Amino acid sequence: MDLGIQHKTALIFGAGGELGGAIALALAREGVKVAIADINKEALGETAKKIADVGGKSLSLLWDLGDLSRIDESISSIEAEFESVDILVNNTGGPPTTAAGQNAEIWQQYFNTMVVPVIAITDRVLPAMQRKGWGRIITSTSSGVLAPIPNLAISNALRLGIVGWSKTLSREVAAQGITVNITVPGRIATTRIQALDEAKAKRESRSAADVAAESVSSIPAGRYGSPEEYADAVSFLASTRASYITGSILRVDGGLISGL
């Protein structure tokens, strides 16, 4: 299937990670020019190499999302190297914390790195999308927005705020050819999921293998997903084929989340 996005420009955050990197690579394979951003220089370099290996074009941006002063400079560098951003993939990490006993400074810190930059960066690239009459804004969240995950309270709460923002924005820009969607990964085989399994195993004095096996048994598909499967779903939402999908939450979870 031709996704119809060759020569478009994408900006992907967290592109040094396994999910963000897979998304960047999948879009590059479709002929998209990808600006890849991450705080980890070494990981960013690895993603850039993978993109080059498939003949893709990329621009690497060492970017701390907590530094809002970098936004205009960084977006301007993308516009100078490629063109204005057509596809924005918001992808941020989240802290493992309980709900009780977290001081206000911790909540403020993660609000400033998980929520404020997503909104501010979207606002920076949105006018160019509006002028073109075409754009894709995709925000990767967590299954915690549908079924709160124990010991991920800050992530659960702040990502729900992003879902409300995304849904509201989708209605404001739909008539301008811009779609705004949320993607929700289930248990995707990444080092973060491995770390969560290991943390649970430590809390419960069990082996990580037992915890992982228990987790897999709760997934109707009977396995963890791959980063590539998640990236393919995001790539479809970024495509011209998905022009009538907006304001939606797309689960990529192998049937894990039981709620409607």
Image: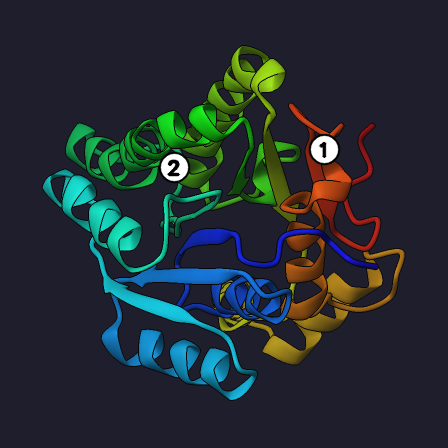
Count the labels in the image: 2
| Quadrant in which residue 17 is drawn | bottom left
Q: Above or below — where is 40 with respect to 172? A: below
Q: Position of residue 123 (x, y in %)?
A: 33, 27
Q: Above or below — where is 185 with respect to 118? A: below
Q: Residue at x 29, y 31 (%)?
A: 124
Amino acid, disc 1: Ser
Instruction: Classify mark 2: helix, strand or loop.
Output: helix
Q: Residue at x 62, y 14 (%)?
A: 175
Q: Is residue 163 left or right of residue 209?
A: left
Q: Position of residue 20 (x, y in %)?
A: 48, 61
Tell me the quadrant of the picture where the C terminus can be found: top right
Spatial CA span between label 1 and label 2: 33 Å
Instruction: Classify mark 1: helix, strand or loop.
Output: loop
Relative depth, front residue between 93 and 219 = 93
Q: Position of residue 79 (x, y in %)?
A: 29, 49
Q: Above or below — where is 124 with respect to 231? A: above
Relative depth, front residue between 227 and 207 = 227
Q: Which residue is mark 1?
A: 243
Camera sees residue 203: no
Q: Which residue is mark 2?
A: 154
Tell me the quadrant of the picture where the N terminus can be found: bottom right
Relative depth, front residue between 2 and 245 = 2
Amino acid, disc 2: Ile
Q: Residue at x 49, y 83 (%)?
A: 50
Q: Nearer the viewer, mark 1 or mark 2?
A: 1
Q: Earlier in the sequence, mark 1 or mark 2?
A: 2
Q: Is residue 251 left or right of residue 115?
A: right
At label 2, counting other C-alpha atoms closer than 10 Å, the crowd grade (few under 14, some 14-19, many 20 or more) is: many
Relative depth, front residue between 49 and 249 = 49
